[in-house]
């Protein structure tokens, strides 16, 4: 345990604060398993995970990372037991109320991505309040993906574009222009996508935006994903050679 702690501390010391990712995305995985390992209800895991989101978001802001996007509830998560879904939505409402109270004071923007139509009127009202407050804030932005799916996002974007073509828009578009139809319009694509919890897949998360994202997987469950674990992910990112199809940072085709 002591050796592990020393390695984590060393990771933090090795971080180059001038080469941090601008945008980090995280799949919040492992809350239920974390609770089950402790003979607790799965809802206790979601509560712990929500608290950890606050911790990691504050840490990202302190480091100077501009954007944090988290996958909190997918379009498929409605298939979970009704009691679990209700608990997650209750946590979301509580977090939104706290955010509304603190956003302007702390200069933290909060944006919700996803299809909001199935959410309760109260939840949608709270989200609308955060949007109004966002107009007063410049700085760190946390994005919550709620009732979100990557394929659904791309389909919605394609339908919006097709409708504009029907209304007279020229039928010619670049990848950069198509990105403006995504929930993430105006944001840089994530430089780093982190998945705690031991699974090695993206699970329908940011499928358009992840084309050149660095991926980092760890067996650590989300409620146990500490700031030291975040340092390890960021250090791994800094040790990658991001070529974007070129060769060691030089433009051209990768051979």
Image (spheres, rainbow, N blue to C red):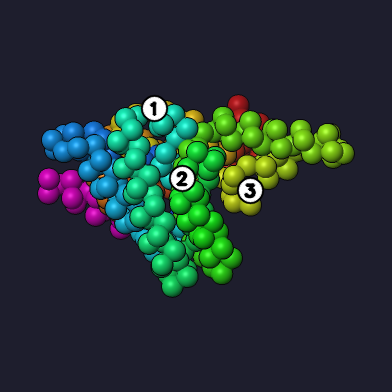
Residue under the point 51% across and 33% down: 149
Q: What secondary structure is marked by label 1?
A: helix
Q: Is residue 154 visible?
A: yes
The numbered mark at residue 120 is 2
The numbered mark at residue 67 is none
Query: In the image, residue 23 lies at what x, y percent?
Result: 50, 51
**Quadrant of the rendered structure where residue 1 is?**
top left
Q: What secondary structure is marked by label 3?
A: loop
- Pointers 3 and 1 in contact (C-beta within 8 Å): no
Tell me: 250 left or right of 173.
left
Q: Which numbered disc, 2 or 3, marks the residue closer to the eye?
A: 2
- Pointers 2 and 1 in contact (C-beta within 8 Å): no
**Span colored in magenta:** 1-16
Q: Tag 3 or tag 2, which sits nearer the N-term?
A: 2
Query: In the image, residue 148 lies at what x, y percent?
Result: 50, 37
Residue under the point 30% across and 36% down: 84
Above or below, 32 against 189 in this view is above
Could you say which is closer to the camera, residue 59 or residue 160? 160
Determine crowd level at label 2: few under 14, some 14-19, many 20+ residues with C-alpha closer than 10 A.
few
Q: Which numbered disc, 2 or 1, marks the residue closer to the eye?
A: 2
Q: Which residue has dot 3 on it?
A: 185
Above or below, 178 against 13 in this view is above
Q: Which residue has dot 1 on it?
A: 79
Quadrant of image for the C terminus: top right
């Amino acid at each position: 345990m002591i050796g592990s702690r020393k390695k984590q501390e060393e990771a933090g010391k090795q971080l180059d604060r001038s080469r941090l990712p601008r945008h980090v995305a995280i799949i919040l995985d492992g809350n239920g398993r974390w609770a089950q390992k402790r003979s607790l209800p799965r809802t206790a895991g979601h509560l712990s995970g929500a608290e950890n989101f606050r911790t990691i978001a504050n840490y990202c802001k302190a480091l100077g990372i501009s954007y944090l996007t988290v996958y909190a509830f997918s379009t498929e998560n409605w298939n979970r037991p009704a009691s679990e879904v209700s608990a997650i939505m209750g946590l979301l409402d509580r977090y939104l109320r706290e955010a509304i109270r603190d956003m302007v004071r702390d200069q933290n923007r909060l944006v919700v991505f996803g299809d909001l139509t199935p959410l309760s009127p109260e939840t949608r009202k709270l989200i609308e309040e955060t949007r109004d407050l966002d107009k007063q804030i410049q700085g760190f932005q946390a994005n919550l993906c709620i009732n979100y799916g990557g394929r659904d996002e791309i389909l919605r974007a394609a339908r919006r574009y097709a409708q504009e073509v029907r209304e007279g828009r020229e039928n010619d578009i670049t990848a950069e222009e198509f990105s403006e139809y995504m929930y993430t319009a105006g944001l840089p694509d994530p430089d780093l996508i982190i998945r705690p919890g031991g699974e090695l897949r993206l699970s329908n998360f940011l499928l358009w935006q992840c084309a050149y994202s660095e991926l980092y997987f760890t067996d650590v469950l989300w409620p146990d994903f500490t700031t030291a674990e975040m340092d390890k992910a960021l250090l791994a990112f800094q040790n990658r050679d991001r070529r974007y199809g070129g060769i060691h940072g030089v433009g051209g085709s990768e051979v």
